Amino acid sequence: MTVGVRQMITTVQQHILQQQQQVQEASGRFSWLLSGITLATKMVEAKIRTAGLSDALGAFGATNVQGEQQQKLDVYANQALLHCLGLRDSVAALVSEEDEEPVTFDRSESGKYIIVFDPLDGSSNIDVNVNVGTIFSVLRRLPDGSLNASVLQPGREQVAAGYVVYGPSTVLVYTTGHGVHGFTLDPTIGAFVLTNENMRMPEQGSYYSVNEANAATWPDKYREYVGKLRSGALGRQYSSRYIGSLVADFHRTLLKGGVFLYPPTKDQPGGKLRLMYEANPLAFIAEQAGGMASSGTQRILDIQPEAVHQRTPFMVGSRQEMETLLLNGYTK
Ligand code: AHM
Ligand code: MG
């Protein structure tokens, strides 16, 4: 029996094209756009793999718009994404955690999409060889709104979202609103190959993930909630896992279930994580996989952004843990 190449593997680009064919006349434009992201993330992964051998580790010597020390790899990852996506003529604007203002392109005809991204999430973990990642969100430019209004759309308007985790394997997860699909980079052929189709977050897990060093300054109800998880009140004995790279903590939560929390703290009463390029894309993926995401007072995807670098408290996870959290007095 002959096994055709098509049956042997499905690459992320083939998968996106197939998904597009199901919903509309496929022009190939959208898959070409997303190939800019996969190319950039492959460049980043190659740099990370050999970071200790070259001069790629450590601080770059500047601070970004968040007032945080930029690492050399933050700068490289940002440049790789800006370069690879800037060449796609369907891109109207690029919004990065590392740049104060969106980078815009004068493409009134062809520029249909806005890409919002965190080029290297968890970068404080780079120097200690712990997982980091890239997170992205795709918005459609509004037909008659300004570019600024098109950028500041609530997360429910995302047309696609995804992330890459640079871990023991390099894994890409994405959604276009038709389920969540996972791919593993096969370094021998340089392609992301389908390994997890239609991923579902378990209804309940047994891990909670939170920086407990902040517990003393959380609002009371978060302490009570984490106390419930610890005491077995949800019918399970929970364990804690906290990597400190959102993308890696989220990936575990997607696969194993449970809950990730970054509540308000005394120092950051509005939350630490960023709405547009951290919370929104992961909330879209969580909901598509059967989970939930909330700021504590509102569904993440319904928040109307007012600024590109806006922060939010962020709670995401399995339906059971999230419903218990929201019943705990957090709905409006
Ligand atoms: P960044 O590395 O893009 O700045 O992301 C912020 C990181 C998240 O990846 C992670 O969830 C969080 O900050 C950890 O914060 P803390 O060290 O306060 O626990
Ligand atoms: Mg980040």
Image (spheres, grey):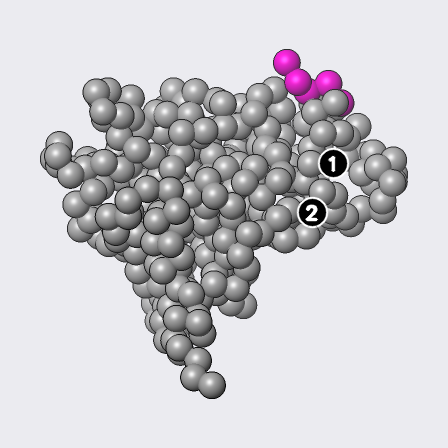
Which mark, residue 202?
Answer: 2
Helix, strand or loop at label 2? It is loop
Q: Report, in whole angstroms, how far the alpha carbon at label 1 lies from the one at label 2.
A: 9 Å
Magenta stretch: residue 331 in it? yes
Give residue 7's quadrant in the image: bottom left
Using the image, determine if residue 86 lies above or below residue 189. Answer: above
The image position of residue 322, as x and y in percent, is 69, 33
**On the image, numbered disc 1 is attached to which residue?**
320
Q: As drawn, is 59 to the left or to the right of 108?
A: right
Determine contact: label 1, label 2, CB under 8 Å: no
The majority secondary structure of the magenta stretch comes to: loop
For the magenta stretch, what is the residue range?
328-332
Q: As drawn, is 100 to the left or to the right of 176?
A: left
Using the image, determine if residue 332 lies above or below residue 120. Answer: above
Mark 1 burial class by Cα count in 10 Å: few <14, some 14-19, many 20+: some
Magenta stretch: residue 294 in it? no
The image position of residue 52, as x and y in percent, is 42, 70
Considering depth in this image, is 66 or 280 the residue closer to the camera? Answer: 280
Give residue 212's quadrant in the image: top right
Identified by mark 1, the residue type is Gln
Q: As drawn, is 257 to the left or to the right of 182?
A: right
Identified by mark 2, the residue type is Pro
**Badge 2 residue CB within 8 Å of ligand 1:** no
Residue drawn at point x = 36 percent, y = 29 percent:
308
Residue drawn at point x = 23 percent, y = 36 percent:
112
